[in-house]
Image: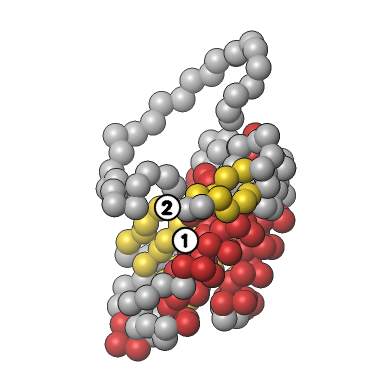
Amino acid sequence: MSVDTAAATDRLMRFLAVPGVTGQEKAIAREIMAALKQAGVPAKAMRFDDANTRIALPTETGNLIVELPGRGTMRDQPRLMFMTHMDTVPLCAGAQPKISGRKIVNQAKTALGGDNRCGCGILVSLAAELIRQKLDHPPITLLFCVREESGLHGARHVDLNALGAPAMAFNFDGSSASSITIAAVGADHWEAEIFGRASHA
C-alpha cells in the first residue's frame, strides 16, 4: 500500500502555519475541516461538540468530531476511534514552517508546533488515504480535541455520546512512530508559581 507522502507533507505544512494556541482553536479547526473536505469527507460527517461550554477557561470552540462510515467487508466491524489535539503551546504563535532537506524547520523565532499538528496531519491523511484508495475499513471516529496543552480539558469534557461508542481508541501525541503506549499509571496535579522568563507552556 502506497501513501501519498507529498500530500501528507503539504497538509502538515498548512496546519503548522495556522495559529491555534490552547483555547484558540477555531482557525485550525476550520483548516482541518477544509482539508478533510478536499480529501472527500462530506461536511455532514463533521461537527463540534459543546465541550467549550463546560470548560472553565475561555475556549473558542468545542472538540471537532468526524465520523467515517465503514466500508466493504469491514463495514459492520466494531467502531475505532483515532484522536489527537488541535492546540499548541503559546510559544508556537507565529510559526513559519519551511522544508529544509528532509526536515521541517521554523523560519520564525517561535516554537514550531509539531505538538500536535503532526497528530492532526496523521488523522486527516488517514481519512484521505482510506477514501483515495477505496480501502475496506470499520466505522471510524476522528476526534480533534481542544485545550490539551492547558490540562486535557477538551478530552475531559468531550460529549461521550457523540463518539459512536468506539470499541478501541488510539491517541496520536508524540513519541516515535515505532513505539506505542498502552497504559499510564495515572496523574497528579499541583501548582507552582515560577518567576523568570517563559520557556514553555
The residue that mark 1 highlights is 122
Q: Which mark is residue 196?
A: none
Is residue 147 visible to us here? no
Closer to the camera: disc 2 or disc 1?
A: 1
51 or 35, nearer to the observer:
35
**Left of 3 or right of it: where is 192?**
right
Q: Quadrant of residue 95?
A: top right
Residue 8: give x, y in percent of width and height: 51, 66
Residue lying at 57% horizontally and 45% vertically, measured from the top left: 105
The residue that mark 2 highlights is 172
SS for tag 1? helix
Residue 60: give x, y in percent of width and height: 72, 49
Residue lying at 62% horizontally and 77% vertically, measured from the top left: 38
Is residue 14 visible to us here? yes
**Tag 1 or tag 2, which sits nearer the N-term?**
1
Q: Quadrant of the C terminus?
A: top right
**Left of 126 or right of it: where is 147?**
right
At label 2, which amino acid type do we have? Phe
Residue 94: give x, y in percent of width and height: 72, 42
Residue lying at 69% horizontally and 63% vertically, measured from the top left: 30
Q: CA distance from mark 2 to mark 1?
A: 8 Å
Give yes or no for contact between labels 2 and 1 (Cβ–Cβ under 8 Å).
yes
Label 2 crowd bin: few (<14), some (14–19), many (20+), radius 10 Å: some
Residue 145: give x, y in percent of width and height: 55, 52
Q: Is residue 64 above or below residue 45?
A: above
At label 1, which amino acid type do we have? Ile
Q: Is residue 102 above or below residue 79?
A: above
